[in-house]
Structure formats: C-alpha cells, structure tokens
Image (cartoon, coloured by chain):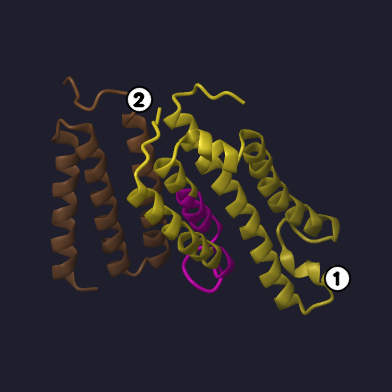
Chain colours: A yellow, B brown
C-alpha cells in the first residue's frame, strides 16, 4: 500500500508536471496518423500522468479524482467507440473499419472521412488504454484489496 | 545506420540486461530494466523504426517501470536466491 507522505516539493512538482504531460498525450493521440504515435502510446502517457498523481498523493486521493466505477465505464466506452465506428461501416455496406464509406453520413470527401474515422478509432483506443493502465496500477499498488 | 553506434548501443543493452538479472536489490533491478528499455528505444530510433521506439519509451520505460515499483511495495526489497 502506498502511504501518504506530505512532501511539498514532490506534490508541487507533480502538480506542475501533470498538465504538460496530459497535453502531450492528447497531441500524440490527435496527431497519430501524421507522425509516430497513436491511441495506444497516447493512452499510455495519459495513464502515466494519472499514476504520477497516485504516487505523489495516495490511493484515496486517486479514488476521489477517478472512482473505480468511472474507470470501468471509461474502459468500456473506449471499446464501444472503436467497435461502433467499425460496425457503422458494416451497416453502410463496406467492410469492417473501412472508413471511406462514412462520407455518406458526414458529407465530406471520402479521403477526409477516412482520416476522421482513424481519429475516432484512436480516441476510443486511447480512452480504453488509459483506463486499463490506471486500473492495473491501482490493483497492483493496493495489493488487490480494493474497496468500491 | 552507423554500425559503430549500433554495436556500442547493443553492447550496453546486453550489459544492462545481464545486470538486471544478476543484481540482488529488486528496486535496482526495476530501474535497470528501465535503462534497458531506454537503450533499446535509442537503438530502434537509430535503426529508423521511430514508431516502435516511441512505443518502447512509453510502455517499456514509463508504464512498466511504474508497475514494477508498485509491485515492490508488496514484497521485500531484497531477493532470497
């Protein structure tokens, strides 16, 4: 169990570091199809910023910021976004995750629809990876004794 | 690709991997695995696989080191064997 140690230097530095890390994670997710990166890496960085807050404070504080229930809901919502975009392509008559067909409902060019579909899938992957990483860390750090 | 840089990085990677499994202190072992991941990330960047290197830096060096340190809280710091 991680015990709370009130050290003002560690807590202030972590508070200052977390917003740039989260901004960088969002950049990695949103820019994933032009440059190295993507949903998985961005989600990992987003989860790491939360783990940093857990290490600087304690698990109770982490539960106050993001409860176990919210964590489970987020990890399912990400998968739902991913599978939903894939199934939408199936309903419109193309293959699974064939985003080009999405131009029928978004009224943009097929190439633009393909780029937007990739972005949507990566947002879903990022949300799921973030929630699962945080939940793995909380389960390891609390030794499995995890009251709801 | 510069083969001298590749060779030097590869030798340090092997040294840090051997050090990570021989050292008795578990916290040092976790940190040495982080060093190993970062060196592997450098090696992949130098070989041109930037996406793999980014994944290695985010997952191997960042998240899994935090998981190992969280795990050491649950056990003793020194190994028996």
Quarter of the image for residue B4 reads bottom left
For mark 2, what is the residue? B74
Q: Could you tell me which residue is drawn at 37 percent across and 66 percent down?
A: B49
- Quadrant occupied by the C terminus of chain A: top right
- Is A10 left, or right, of A110 in this rendering? left
- Is B40 left, or right, of A14 in this rendering? left
Q: How far is disc 1 from disc 2 in space, using C-alphas? A: 54 Å
- Is A104 left, or right, of B72 in this rendering? right
For mark 1, what is the residue? A104
Which element is circle 2 on?
A: loop
- Quadrant occupied by the N terminus of chain A: top left
Residue A79 position, x and y percent, is: 67, 46
Q: Return the residue nearer the eye: B43 or A72.
A: A72
Q: Could you tell me which residue is drawn at 36 percent across and 37 percent down?
A: A5
Which element is circle 1 on?
A: helix
The chain ID associated with circle 2 is B
Depicted A146 relative to depicted B1: above or below: above
């Amino acid at each position: 169990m991680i015990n709370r140690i009130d050290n003002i230097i560690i807590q202030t530095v972590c508070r200052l570091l977390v917003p740039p890390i989260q901004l960088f994670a969002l950049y990695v997710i949103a820019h994933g199809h032009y440059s190295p990166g993507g949903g998985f890496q961005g989600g990992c960085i987003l989860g790491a910023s939360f783990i940093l807050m857990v290490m600087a404070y304690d698990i109770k504080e982490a539960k106050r910021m993001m409860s176990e229930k919210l964590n489970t809901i987020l990890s399912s919502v990400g998968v739902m976004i991913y599978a939903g975009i894939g199934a939408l392509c199936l309903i419109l008559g193309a293959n699974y995750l064939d985003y080009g067909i999405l131009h029928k409902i978004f009224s943009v060019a097929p190439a633009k629809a393909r780029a937007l579909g990739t972005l949507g899938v990566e947002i879903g992957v990022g949300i799921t990876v973030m929630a699962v990483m945080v939940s793995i860390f909380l389960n390891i750090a609390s030794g499995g004794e995890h009251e709801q | 690709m510069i083969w001298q840089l590749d060779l030097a990085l590869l030798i340090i990677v092997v040294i840090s991997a051997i050090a990570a499994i021989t050292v008795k202190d578990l916290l040092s072992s976790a940190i040495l695995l982080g060093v190993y991941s970062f060196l592997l990330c450098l090696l992949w960047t130098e070989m041109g696989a930037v996406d793999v290197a980014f994944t290695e830096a985010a997952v191997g060096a960042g998240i899994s080191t935090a998981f190992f340190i969280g795990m050491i809280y649950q056990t003793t710091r020194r190994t028996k064997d």
